[in-house]
Image: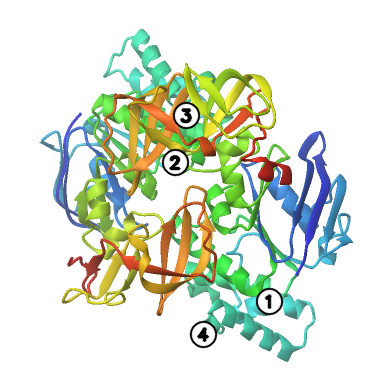
Amino acid sequence: MAQIVIKNVRKEFGAFTAVQSSSFTIEDGEFFMLLGPSGCGKTTTLRMIAGLELPTAGEIYIDGEEVSQKPASQRDIAFVFQMFALYPHMNVRKNISYPLVSQGMPRDQVRAKVNEVAEILGISNLLESPVGGLSGGDRQRVALGRAIVRDPACFLMDEPLGALDAEFREFMALELRALHDRMGATTVYVTHDQLEAMQMGDKIVVMNHGVVEQFGKPQDIYDWPATTFVAKFIGSPAMNLLDFDGMVGNGSRSVTMSEASFDIPEMISGANGTLTLGVRPEHVRLDDAAPFRGRIVAAEYLGTTQIVTLDTGHGPVKSRIGSDIVVNIGDLTGLRFDPRSVTVFDAANGKALVSQANQKVLIHG
Amino acid sequence: MAEVELQHVSKSFGPREALQDVSITVPDGAFVVLLGPTGAGKTTMLRMVSGLDKPDRGEVHIGGQSMKGLTPAQRNVAMVFQQYSLYPHLTVRQNMEFPLKSPLLKTPPAEIARKVGEVAEILQISHKLDNKATQLSGGEMQRVSIGRALVRNPSVYLMDEPLSSLDAKLRADLRVELKNIQANLGATFLYVTHDQIEAMTMATHVGVLDHGRLVQFGSPREVYEQPISIYAAGRLGQPHINILPAELFGAAPAGAVSIGLRPEHITQGQGQDCLVKRVEHLGDQTRLHLSYRNSDLITVTEAHTPLKSGDIIKIQPNRPFYFDGAGNRIG
């Protein structure tokens, strides 16, 4: 069990800065996601928590103790790299026992502990089997067993499901999360998959180019992105971002684009020049009477819903609507945005402008 | 472009039957996506059409002509594989021009330049045209290999998971682009993927393969809304369809062993009490993991639901599918 505090952590590799200055807190028992594209610094951050890399500057606290310059062996953590890395010549029991035996734990204690872990993972019946003949799922459970058998204060996982095919991945994601809920150990999990992050995480840090873009609960980040990067990275399809020239200030309640007026949440900050209006596809409705026009260029069937792409004077806009609504490619139609869900960004720096709607999320982050 | 037809095609590799008596007609101008897990026979089917493998039994026809004995080159098909294969010593432009420079085609240079420029634009690689192939990232190389197929004008495009190595954003863009290209050219596409989003969004027809057999062939909507079996129902839909004991929610049709409920086909607020075990906020919607009697099921609800784990809600099936003991649909 552990709380992990990252404070102004920076990591340089020669001239390259992998992590600029990260600060966030992982609460005891949380399932915490480090999310971002490749090269964003998420794995480096995880490796610094583990002690596999030492930060160039800043502090890392595990349960109140500053550990940033301590080696991995002196931190009470378990690192799960690639779940399939098992010792092929050993059976399941020996694979799971290994970390305990190498710590010098007495044999009967090891036995009891391994039995308990096998029970949690539902692999008691496989303990004496060779790992060679196991299914992918069982191999993964064994690898997990080896990590949890040590009862570490926290688990660090680097894209553990990355190599699996979609169906199995979904299944293992649920299982990992259920396991966490039973054991309650703090888990820090690196992924580039935004859906995996939303689905499994209690909290998410979104990173880009070594910078923490946003930190918070999945739904808050989805609803109220702090930057256009987060708006584009989270959600599938991404948030629509429409550039326009305009001005907003304290008390503004609407913006004008292509002579059409759009209601927005009441602003409590201002910007002038090129602004970006952000709206999620599910908050875009097609309405022939609406003054803001677009031409339908694609409709993608997704079962209950469909994604309709429209070309507008401000770039393409995607709308998620019911698949029972008939749309014709090539038709010109109007678009309406749900005014409660709109974010306005300052295009100059990509940062969200604070409004009555997003202030709680942005100020917290 | 041309119609592609497989007539009673079977193929074995040693003891393993990769295709068993597959008959399918890919209409001219159709975008057919083959779906199925690893080993279902998807790639083997593509290789039959391309001529890279020969059927043990049955025939392949392209544009009404039997392909028996014809080499891949003689069939005029364009292929894109999962792993890109570019000429490393050539530039992107030269790689893409290559198929057009074939002495058989005699394409005028201005036409070649126009075609390559146009395709590069679509694939977002215009700025890389003069780079060596080896200077590209994996995603860029894959786009070049797609480009090399698109500059041609074959009878049919055969694509084997062409987007699987690309990142999510690019994959979403190229899904729309490939679909547009196909529709604009009126091209015939035979396309293999694991990704059900690609299948749903791009296909005019989906072919569901199970252990070398074609078990359902229809529009994505037909396969989604009228699956013929548990297996076919499980190919499309995210999250996965719930398969539960037939009588879990009361009387079921005679012979039914399982009830299949898509997560969105569960009505909330009326019916049976069940326990919310886990709530996943995915942004645009929320997934609820429910426990009812001895079964677990998943449903979806609005993004900002106040529900939390431990709550009790009422649910009842809406538009259920029923399946018999063999997994075939009976209602």
Which amino acid lies under the numbered mark 1 shown in the image of this protein? Val
Which chain letter goes with mark 1? A
* N-terminal label among 4 and 1: 4
Q: Give the spatial CA distance, label 2 vs label 1.
A: 44 Å
Residue under circle 2? A282
Relative to B95, is A268 above or below?
below
Front in this rendered view, residue A207 or A69? A207
Relative to A138, is A101 above or below?
below
Whether residue A151 sits left or right of residue A282 in the image: it is right
- Residue B49: x percent and y percent? 23, 42
Q: Give the spatial CA distance, label 1 vs label 3.
A: 50 Å
Whether residue B80 sits left or right of residue A256 in the image: it is left
Bin the neighbour count of mark 2 within 10 Å (Cα to Cα): few under 14, some 14-19, many 20 and up. Answer: many
Which amino acid lies under the numbered mark 2 shown in the image of this protein? Glu
Residue A359 seen: yes
Q: Which residue is found at the position 20% from the left and 28% from the top?
A: B1
Which amino acid lies under the numbered mark 3 shown in the image of this protein? Tyr
* N-terminal label among 2 and 1: 1
Q: Quick one: quadrant of the C terminus of chain A?
A: top right
